[in-house]
Amino acid sequence: MDHFCPWVGGIVSETTMKFFVQFVFYATFLCGLIVIVLAYYVDDRKKKLGDLNVGWVAVLAVAGLFVLFSAGMTMSTLWMTSSNLTTIENLNKGSQVYNIAVLLKPDAAIPNPSQPGANQDAGTAPGYGTITYPLLLQAHQSETARSVGPESSSSRPSPPRRTFAVLSTRPGMNPWDLGSVWANLCSLMGNSFDQWFLPIKPSPFAMRRRLTEYQFGPVILELVHMYRLQDAVSEDLLLDVGQGRKLGAFGRKKVHRRRPRKHEERRRRRRGTVVTPGDVV
């Protein structure tokens, strides 16, 4: 959820942001069309009859007001989308600090941030901490072992332990900025013209992902280098950030799949180009 919009009477969130942009865009187009048509008829009536229709003038004024309002909403929303910011995030974008947990390799040698030179490029960035999951306290562990018994507790497979480095961004960093305006817009609107102009599919960034909730941008790579964790972070995360840079491939060509081999053999058999075992003399 981002915020409740009283103008549309609902919540603008990850699942409705794209449809909100389409709504205000088409509202601008409709109100602009009304302004153009009414302005023509008001001017034509004044030239031919010498008077003005008060009702037409009132509708023209209201339509002009809505054109300015909806156009401003459209432009401001697209401007925030170009940086992958929501309305709430845009309020304190210059001072916001994010804490991001980055998955580390199981056998990675984690540099100590307190060592001299370990964080020399970080500037004002604070040191980082690590956390390991699953969290299982020693008291709870011993209590579980007593209640379950040694045999069943030893036979139960333990979940894999994963270690994360909690990295803090500098003020103003946006980890969800994909690095280009076009990629950010496509992550909201889609990768085809019908998705941009028709409310038929949700935004690509609203699809649940395996590694992260949302696509991370190059800021994650900057954080990894800033904290000197290039050899310690998971390779899947680095590849995932690289895929984010490739977003925005508009008008991709469709890949035509080859026909199944059964159909090809049937087609060749009709032409007499396939020799079957029964045809061998």
Image (tube, helix red, strand yellow):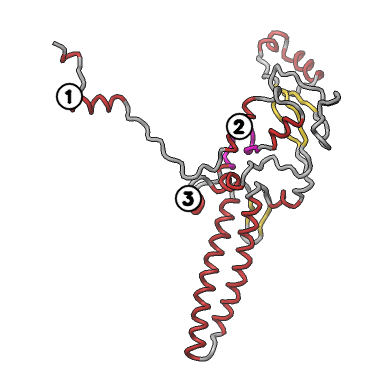
Mark 1 is on which residue type?
Gly
Alpha carbons under labels 2 and 3: distance apart: 25 Å
On screen, residue 80 versus residue 207, left or right, reads right
| Residue 4, position as x, y percentages in the image | 67, 55
- Which residue is labeled 3 in the image? 193
On screen, residue 125 versus residue 37, left or right, reads right
Q: In which image quadrant can residue 230 be found?
A: top right
Name the residue located 58 percent from the left edge and 72 percent from the top edge.
63
Name the residue located 70 percent from the left edge and 20 percent from the top edge.
161
* Residues rendered magenta in the picture: 205-217
| Residue 194, position as x, y percentages in the image | 47, 50
Name the residue located 20 percent from the left edge and 18 percent from the top edge.
275
Instruction: Inspect the magenta stretch and tell me whether residue 263 lies in it.
Output: no
- Which residue is labeled 2 in the image? 240
On screen, residue 70 versus residue 89, left or right, reads left
Alpha carbons under labels 1 and 2: distance apart: 50 Å
Work out whether 158 lies above or below 102: above
Q: In which image quadrant can residue 262 be found?
A: top left
Mark 2 is on which residue type?
Asp
